[in-house]
Image: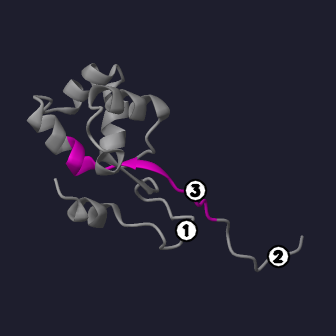
Amino acid sequence: MAHSNAPAAVLVRAPAVMVRGEAFRELGRWHGMRSAQAWATRLGLTLSTVTRNINGETAASGAFIAGVLTIFPDVAFERLFYIGTPSGAPSAASGDLADADDADEALAV
């Protein structure tokens, strides 16, 4: 059996639409949705789905995005979402993507 010196494969996730967690928390506080469960109920999604989205553990699904924009049609998409990768995953863009924390800080909320 031949040995390979090739590096081990690394799973790299493609950029995706991610949730600006702090912007969501603040919007929720302004509208009486102070918990992930309140968001889940209002969006018609599971608590785990909402929690993973707000914590940056998963990309926002079409249902999540559509639900939020339906409830808050006057809130700009860019205020609540950004292009990034789920937490802990290497970026396919190798540094071309804005860091989620920096993006939240740059946001005028």
Query: The residue tagged with tag 3: helix, strand or loop?
Result: loop
Q: Position of residue 6 (x, y in %)?
A: 75, 76
Residue 74 belongs to the span the image colors magenta: no
User: In terms of image quadrants, where is residue 42?
Assistant: top left
Please give the label number shown on residue 14: 3
Please give the label number shown on residue 102: none
Query: The residue tagged with tag 2: helix, strand or loop?
Result: loop
Viewer-closest of 75 and 12: 75
Query: The residue tagged with tag 1: helix, strand or loop?
Result: loop
Q: Tell me how far mark 3 sits from mark 2, CA to CA.
A: 30 Å
Q: Position of residue 87 (x, y in %)?
A: 40, 56
Q: Nearer the viewer, mark 2 or mark 1?
A: 1
Q: Residue at x 30, y 32 (%)?
A: 73
- In the rendered image, the quadrant that contains the N terminus is bottom right
Furthest residue toward bottom: 5
First in residue order: circle 3 vs circle 2: 2
Going by the numbered disc 3, the residue's amino acid type is Ala
Viewer-closest of 15 and 11: 15
Q: Tell me how far mark 2 sits from mark 1, CA to CA.
A: 31 Å
Please give the label number shown on residue 93: 1
Say few, some or many: other residues with alpha carbon within 10 Å of mark 3 (under 14 / 14 to 19 / 20 or more): some
Q: Which residue is mark 2?
A: 3
Residue 16 belongs to the span the image colors magenta: yes
Q: Which residues are magenta?
A: 10-24
Please indicate whether residue 48 sits to the left or right of residue 16 in the image.
left
Please indicate whether residue 55 sits to the left or right of residue 66 in the image.
left
Q: Tell me how far mark 1 sits from mark 3, CA to CA.
A: 8 Å
In the displayed structure, 44 sits above or below 109; it is: above
